[in-house]
Amino acid sequence: MRKISAALTFGIATLATGFLVGACGDSSTPNGTANSGSTATPAANSTTTSSSKGLKIGSLLPTTGDLASVGQQMLGSVPLLVDTVNACDGVNGEPVTLVQVDDQTDPKAGAAGMTKLATLDKVAGVVGSFASSVSSAAVSIATPNKVMLVSPGSTSPVFTEKAQKGDFKGFWARTAPPDTYQALALAQLANKKGFKRISTVVINNDYGVGFEKAFVQTFEKLGGTIVNKDKPVRYDPKAQTFDTEAAAAFAGKPDAVLAVLYAETGSLFLKAAYQQGVAKGVQILLTDGVKSPTFPEQVGKGSDGKYILTGAIGTVPGSDGKALESFNKLWKDKKGGAPGEYAPQAWDAAALLTLAAQAAKENTGVGVASKIREVANAPGTEVTDVCEGLKLLKQGQDINYQGASGNVDVDANGDVVGVYDVWTVGDDGQIKVIDKVTPK
């Protein structure tokens, strides 16, 4: 793929900045032949699977940056879905084209990437982003450009609030439930374990602050006390030292500390807390932002040789969809091993884009947005296989897609309700799921 000129790169970045002020892996062509090329800009790296006609979709996910360790786990889902769809005759009689962009876990890079996808690549829909702060930047560009944005992991409650106000005009949805539900699940878990006094520390962005707000409200309703409610600890996403934040978060002798973090900066925070000795005897409560197999190693071991995170517990949106078993089998057959966190949600996001385009009988963002809730909800024939869904839609029938992550019943605000896995870190530094909770 040819490289974008320096002038065009500058223009894209400048346009993305204007929107902000106002508001990697391999892919395959339809015949299965590897065909990857990259276009580098200061904002994002992209890989394109090209076709001259037909539906064009993009992905805007973190290959690099603070959430790379989680983002890497879902990157294979979208091209796998596109390959599957193209193997069963594509959408509206043509192969689907995929353009992949690395958002670098950075709102500015994500905005530039979204601008490229919308104005240069002219995609109809995008799977992304993961970080809520990046999705906030991206959706402000997707909406006026009439591009359907479906996030597999942006869980901030802010999106629900803005959707209710009509800010997104129907061009937003997500396959992971909002943190109002995860915060509820984690608060109920903390209460069940007998924690009465909890402090909070969160990354200062839509994800962290939104989660904090929902958790505090729920935990207090359950009779708990937030020790630092009047002085919440919120750290700069670009911070590199955390001594002050660690001391403040663990002050007041809480039973537990809720830490809503991203992996790279979060590991530094937890190291600082350990080195100061303030974390001793305090339960660490974590969330989906750091659940990756490499995170305990990132945080490291203590002077006793044990993992600092041993015994920490957390929650993460789980997957219990009717299509999960077949998705896991496909992943194993094509890639080996098991898919990581949010891979089912990313698969479902891409599936909904293709099914909606087929239902609309047009490859436009307006068409996709007009049908995405229709194919995700009853009434209609329940389908777990994307190809079966496309076949029925081509015959003029209605469908109700049942995904790998869940039933993906997308509501008027673009939200779904899900189940949550409870996970912990063992003595060996391995993360294991120990329970499932459904918020009530």
Image: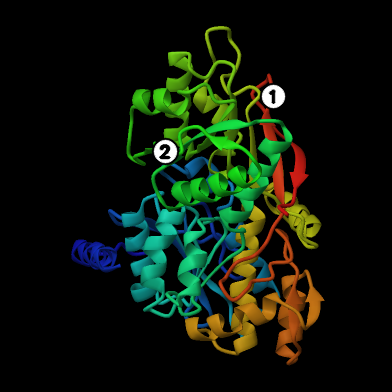
**Residue 256 placement, left or right of 382:** left
Occupied quadrant, residue 311: top right
Q: Percent position (x, y) of residue 45?
A: 38, 55
Residue at 67% from the left image edge and 56% from the top image edge: 344
**Three-letter residue code for mark 1:** Gly
Q: Percent position (x, y) of residue 346?
A: 60, 59
Q: Which residue is mark 2?
A: 232
> Which is more toward the observer, 48 or 338?
338
Q: Percent position (x, y) of residue 115?
A: 34, 68
Mark 1, mark 2: which one is toward the viewer? 2
> Which is more toward the observer, 19 or 439?
439
Q: How many discs mark residues in the rendered view? A: 2
Mark with earlier residue (1, 2): 2
Tell me: residue 355, above or below residue 428: below
Query: Is residue 62 something one can see in this rendering?
Result: no
**Quarter in which the C terminus is drawn:** bottom right
**Residue 335 placement, left or right of 207:** right
**Three-letter residue code for mark 2:** Pro
Instruction: State the residue lying farthest toward the top.
Output: 304
Q: Percent position (x, y) of residue 423?
A: 69, 36
Spatial separation of the CA atoms under disc 1 and disc 2: 29 Å
| Label 2 CA crowd tier, 10 Å (few <14, some 14–19, many 20+) | some
> Which is more toward the observer, 6 or 164?
164
Query: Is residue 193 something one can see in this rendering?
Result: yes
Residue at 23% from the left image edge and 67% from the top image edge: 18
Residue at 46% from the left image edge and 52% from the top image edge: 131
Occupied quadrant, residue 175: bottom right
Tell me: residue 399, above or below residue 182: below
> Which is more toward the observer, 204 or 7?
204
Q: Which residue is mark 1?
A: 426
